[in-house]
Amino acid sequence: MTGTISFLPLRLRGVGLSRGGKKVLKDITVSFDHASPKTVIIGPNGAGKSLLLQICHGVVRAESGVVEWSNDPDSAALSQTQSMVFQRPVLFRRSVTDNVLLALKIRGFPKQERCDRAAEALHRTGLSRLADTPARVLSFGEQQRLALARALVVEPRVLFLDEPTASLDPAAAHMVETLIDDAANDGVKIIMTSHDLNQSRRLADEIIFLHRGRIKEHAPAARFFDAPENDLAQAFINGELLWWRRRSIFEDDDGPACD
Ligand SMILES: Nc1ncnc2c1ncn2[C@@H]1O[C@H](COP(=O)(O)OP(=O)(O)OP(=O)(O)O)[C@@H](O)[C@H]1O
Ligand SMILES: [Mg+2]
């Protein structure tokens, strides 16, 4: 459905964003390419990971800087190229199957293919037995898997995943990791966030460590986990609570003063 033209690399230059009167993304300059099939963005709560993914996906507009796909694709072509699973999935108030069928319809898949594709996507995400269930009654983990089924079924070339296993039991998380690996092996560029450092070690080809809206480190995964260069990144992977560290290391702390 998406043709053979690659729209990668996706480049961000000097991207900034404010929310609630505060700068939540600051001078983000980064490039995403097939050379690293799976990019995992990590960092503490509130670092800006979800907003960064949303800017890349085009559902949030950067206030400053440039977001640029290769080959100058038009917005219609881009929307055919990428899918995203949001941290809090938004599902249609229809059955599980209808959610997947609608995604296929919106992307223009031929009517006669849609049922088979939907059934296969539900099978791959372990949702076949819930096919006729209203999506709104699904458990949170089931909703996450349905959101993934819907994102994968349209055969994106770039897949954005925001905490795709956050609410999943170990078996379901393993299944989703396998689906992510399979997609990457099929040439889909994966850009995802994760709070699970073991999962990040297993999946990532490269790591982006984000802290308070800034990229503090961007490195091949093996090197990052072996010897992170940034002291905040080191503290993070050691499981330290970063806001307990000495103020002097927060060189860009622009939070409110209490005294
Ligand atoms: N509408 C809003 N108004 C005010 N602040 C906001 C708004 N949306 C996001 N923020 C702030 O932006 C910052 C980044 O949010 P974001 O959701 O991207 O963080 P995150 O790294 O994904 O966190 P988590 O690990 O908890 O998912 C947070 O401090 C958040 O409070
Ligand atoms: Mg988030």
Image (tube, grey):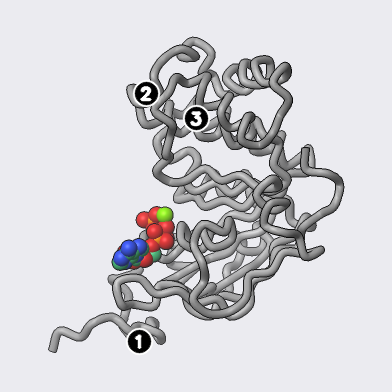
- Left or right: residue 191 compared with residue 44: right
Q: Is mark 1 within 8 Å of ligand 1?
A: no
Tag 1: amino acid: Ser
Q: Given the image, on which type of amino acid does mark 2 rest?
A: Leu
Seen in the picture, residue 208 relative to 122 is either above or below; the reply is below
The residue tagged 3 is 145
Nearer to us of marks 1 and 2 is: 2
- Element assignment for label 2: loop
Q: Which comes before the other along the chain, label 1 or label 2? A: 2
- Per the model, the C-alpha gap separating discs 1 and 3 is 42 Å
What is the C-alpha distance between the residues marked 2 and 3? 10 Å
Residue 37 location, x and y as percent? 73, 51
For the point 81% across and 54% down, the residue is: 6
Q: Nearer the viewer, mark 1 or mark 3?
A: 3
Q: Nearer the viewer, residue 238 or 24?
A: 24
- Residue 249 can be seen in this image: yes
* Quadrant of the displayed image that contains ligand 2: bottom left
Q: Are marks 2 and 3 in contact (CB under 8 Å)?
A: no
As helix, strand or loop, the secondary structure at mark 3 comes to: helix
Q: Which mark is residue 248?
A: 1
Give the image location of residue 212, x and y in percent: 41, 72
Residue at figure coordinates x 77%, y 55% from the top left: 34
Q: Is residue 213 above or below residue 94?
A: below
Image quarter (top left, top right, bottom left or bottom right) of the N terminus:
top right
